[in-house]
Image (tube, rainbow, N blue to C red):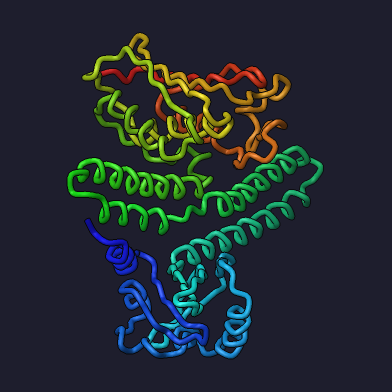
Amino acid sequence: MESNQEIYRLLFENATEGMVVTNNRGIIELVNPRLLTLFGYKEEDLLGEAIEILVPNAAKGNHKEKREGYTKEPKDRKMGGNLDLLAKRKDGSEFSVEIGLNHCYVDEKLKIVALVTDISERVQSQKILKELNIELEHKVKLRTTELENNQKKMEKTLDKERELNELKSRFVSMASHEFRTPLSTILSSATLVGKYEKEDQKDKRDKHVDRIKSSVKNLTSILNDFLSIDKLEDGKIQINNADFLLNELIDEAVGEMEFFLKNKQNISIKNNVTSNQLINSDRNVIKNILINLLSNASKYSDEGKEIEVLISLFDNGIQIDVIDSGIGIPKEEQEKVFTSRFFRAGNVTNIEGTGLGLTIVKKYLSLINGDISFKSTENIGTTFTITISNILV
């Protein structure tokens, strides 16, 4: 069995985030391969150098002052979440980073551990979102001016246009805030799981690694679709139909959800459909719909509550019921569930969410000949039912 020291060494050397260890004077004592790749240095170039070697010239003076203040009162924290923190490579080029600071004591001597993540792609995405939002606002102003010049005959059109563009603007803002998933951390976890389990657990390990990586790719794909609200509104999302096993899809979606369930929550499947039942539709769309409903069931239910999934066939279609014992939807607000975007019931209190999920589910279902309905009682639970016609093979 490997020693703890060997395990820590493997974790350090194979981490997908850059790691650098300094002493209390900011002198670099240890770096991992990922950090060397990020900055373009060799190990001997950095060891013994001040940490400011990795800091842009414009920020070096301020950085040294802040570093000295940190060593006096060290505490774990993150920097760069606001997307304006830069680091400098050996060739002098700069790139956006997020840094997690940690500290420990070795032989009563302070050691500072920094985890460095390259967020250049995230920054670029935010830049694009900002540019789109500015362009959208400009178009709104132009359109508003045009409509105001024809106010007598365009009053109703103006109100509708303002409402539409407000929804678009809110969507871009909310998507940017809520869906900025820390994909690099998830991928890092997937890599570590794949390296440090025992050899006789390889099959299980690989299965979980594949699920995590698949989930990351799936979330990225969904995010790209969500950020293009025009595609959702105009029905421009590409549907790719193919034959696949219904039960395999159900098991895969439920399996991926198990990582995100609350403590002692459980998903039970009641399924009378044969294991070889094929359906012809867009596999990713149906999987996304099911994961969305299961996620809501978990989110709005307490720990220890069971979530049921009922699978049945009708005529030439399928019906899937997702049943929870959660907080339910107040009766007086139920008519808004599918008619008002960004809708969140008054009893969700501090539960996180955008209010877009069910709107997106309904839109996706409309693209694959499906529909959704629900029954809900406050403080008892909710049942969402999706039906998709003419897909049995």
Q: Is residue 126 above or below residue 381?
A: below
> Quick one: quadrant of the C terminus?
top left
Q: Quadrant of residue 208?
A: top left
Residue drawn 58% across the image and 53% down it: 177
| Whole-percent x, y for residue 201 in the image | 22, 43
| Whole-percent x, y for residue 300 in the image | 58, 31
Q: Is residue 40 above or below residue 160?
A: below
**Does the image show residue 371?**
no
| Whole-percent x, y for residue 17 in the image | 39, 66
Q: Is residue 310 above or below residue 104?
A: above
Q: Is residue 10 above or below residue 386?
A: below
Residue drawn 50% across the image and 22% down it: 372
Residue drawn 20% across the image and 42% down it: 203
**Of 22 and 45, which appears nearest the observer?**
22
> Quick one: quadrant of the N terminus?
bottom left
**Does the image show residue 225?**
yes
Residue sticking out furthest to the left: 200
**For residue 381, side relative to residue 388 (left or right):** right
Q: Quadrant of residue 334?
A: top right
Residue drawn 61% across the image and 42% down it: 352
**Of 137 and 363, which appears nearest the observer?**
363
Residue sticking out furthest to the front: 107
| Whole-percent x, y for residue 64 in the image | 57, 87
Q: Quadrant of residue 210?
A: top left
**For residue 113, side relative to residue 80 (left or right):** left
**Of 263 and 161, which appears nearest the observer?**
263
Question: What count of labels does the image hold?
Answer: 0
**For residue 158, side relative to residue 217 (left or right):** right
**For residue 207, side relative to residue 226 (left or right):** left
Residue sticking out furthest to the top: 315
